[in-house]
Image: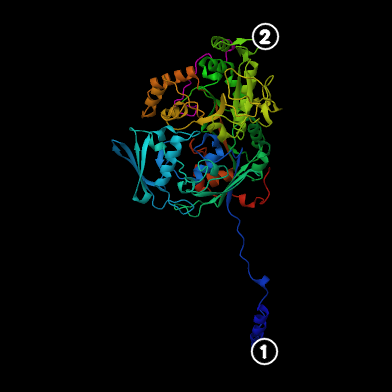
Amino acid sequence: MRARRRFRALPALLLVALLALTGCAADPQPAPPPETNRPTEPVTAPTRVVVGVDDLGPGFNPHLRSDQSAVTTAIASMTLPSVFRPDDRGVPQLDTTVATSATVTSQSPFTVSYELNRDAGWSTGAPIAAEDFVYLWQQMRSRPNTIGAAGYREITDVRSRAAGKAVDVVFREPYPHWRELFGNLLPAHLLKDAPGGWTAPFAGGVPASGGPFRLMQVDRLRGEVLLARNDPYWATAAVVDEIILRRIPANTLPTALESQGVDLALPDARPEITQALDVLARSPEPPTVQSGPRPAVEQLEFRTTDGPLADPRVREGIAALLDRDAIRERVNPDAVAVNAFGAAPSDPGYAPTAPAGAPGRPDAAAAAAAFTEAGYVRGQDGRWTLGGRPLGVVIGAGAERTEDVDVARVVAEQLKAGGIGATIVAPSAPDLLTEPSVAPTTPTPTTTPAPAAGPVPGGSAAPVTTPPAAPTTTTAAPTTSGSPDSGTLVAVDVLVAPRAAYGAVGPRLDSDYGCPADAVPGELPGVACFPALQPLLDELLVAESPDPAVVAEAERVLWRQLPALPLYQAQGLVISNPQTDAATRVTPGPIATGPMSGARTWAEPEGSGERPTGDDDPN
């Protein structure tokens, strides 16, 4: 059949060819100029700002403690909508691109009404609407591993009006800190029915944008995150086409800045960065260096519900053995010591509340007295035992959080020196902060500062390579569920993790150390309830200005009960050159949102467009 159709078509084709030849003979035309002579449109490279960072972090959900990092904060400030954003003094201001108004409309019940910007929408085309408020409220009030959950637990209902473009939020009682809620809204239409929607989609990016930039790609192998201008953004568009966050090792930072491989860098302040800056200070155009506190405090959290640390005397002994200043000097010597549970050194009016002696300062005699009172006996080998069973603890740190693992190593060294068996496990950070028991994953080798015999150049200890901690075949009394070398799940006794260092102190204390009304102690990490503490936290939560006497009493109870032990607050740097300063006017920004808060107005620094493209990653 196909052959027959081809033959039928031949006469017609011959006729067309003859007509074409006849036309050419009767009216000859000059040949068209070669295609190569036509002018070509110049290809314009996208304008961009390249930002050097320490690492990408484990994930990008800004509401999860396990994902907390400078990169997560930067991405959230550029891609996620917030009803209120902090100004330069940290005071929340209404973002009218998201909500045109937000006011208290009733005192009984206490109700806040939001009128949303009708143009505000996600990059998928879906509107930013009431369902996004509902989704964030439901997740924050019920999930572990969250930052600042206490305020969301005060909400009893979230109601939609005006086809989702108006929201009424009803509280249990008047809540003066309501402006701190509903920051970094998430796209409910993509997440609410997705398996693992609260965490899984953020492991490799942000599923949709409601800000001036959109996260386009995360390349963990090269250590890069690409953000591009979000074309559907309804407000003033971003000036620059792209922003790249690029992992830059400290030893290549001077070269990267001088060659404009990066336009600015946002590392943690630490000795190797200081040494790199000393090199740059001798260049013809030394960089601008600004510093600002990170929005988190590093701390140790103790399992108080069961295991050996359920006895407050054992927690007291463990804390008295630990030299917190030595931990900070080993891991992050440029960080600032933290000696309070609620406020951080970055807070106005911060004052230390730690006692003069243990656990504010290490005290071997106090530790021995606490262990002895708990019934432990120290043997000839220096080990503490109870009924012949050695005292041992499991220390947990998120595998992706290298600084947490370094802290865990130093803590284990100090405890072993004090006669306590210590084993380190490093599961994934989300598992560690959400599951009551985790896989006994051994941490990989890492470079950890070693104790210095004396002062060294630059004020830092000499680095050494520390091998993985070998599993310890101790059975702590009456300790964890399974031993770390058994292959079964284990419960973590001492957890290394960050806590938030921004927002009102009352909600901060209740979020970190309070007990949710519907929580079951022991089922989830971080749930530890003390009868003497909860009434104080309840009072501080709803106080517009916290009573200093109540704060002092809450701090006294916390230092006595020791659900945790604060360590330090890291300091961040903003390193830029004159061209970048002129194009971006970058500053450390508010502590909660960081240096990228103003990225929408940034332009490409002069000379940046001439840098190499392609595989120019210094890694």
How many marks can you see?
2
Q: How crowded is mark 2: few (under 14 residues within 10 Å), some or many (20 or more)?
A: few
Q: Which amino acid type corresponds to the residue marked 1 in the rendered image?
A: Ala
Magenta stretch: give its range. 343-365
User: Taking 44 as reference, is 111 left or right?
Assistant: left
**Which quarter of the picture shows residue 569?**
top right
One can see residue 200 in this view = yes
User: Looking at the figure, which quarter contains the N terminus?
Assistant: bottom right
Q: Is residue 613 above or below residue 419?
A: below
Is 259 part of what is drawn in magenta? no
Locate residue 538, reporting x and y percent.
38, 26
One can see residue 359 in this view = no
Q: Is residue 514 above or below residue 123?
A: above
Q: Is residue 263 above or below residue 299?
A: below
Q: Residue 25 carries which label?
A: 1
Name the element at disc 2: loop
Locate residue 90, reporting x and y percent.
44, 35
N-terminal of the pair, mark 2 or mark 1, is: 1
User: Could you tell me how far apart the alpha carbons at marks 2 and 1 are, in whole angstroms?
Assistant: 114 Å
Magenta-colored segment: predominant secondary structure: loop
User: Looking at the figure, which quarter contains the C terminus?
Assistant: top right
Locate residue 428, reporting x and y percent.
59, 35
Name the element at disc 1: helix
Q: Is residue 2 above or below residue 354?
A: below
Q: How crowded is mark 1: few (under 14 residues within 10 Å), some or many (20 or more)?
A: few
Q: Nearer the viewer, residue 553 or 44?
A: 553
Q: Which amino acid type corresponds to the residue marked 2 in the rendered image?
A: Gln
Report which residue position mark 2 lands on: 380
| Residue plotted at (49% across, 31% down) | 501
Is 362 part of what is drawn in magenta? yes
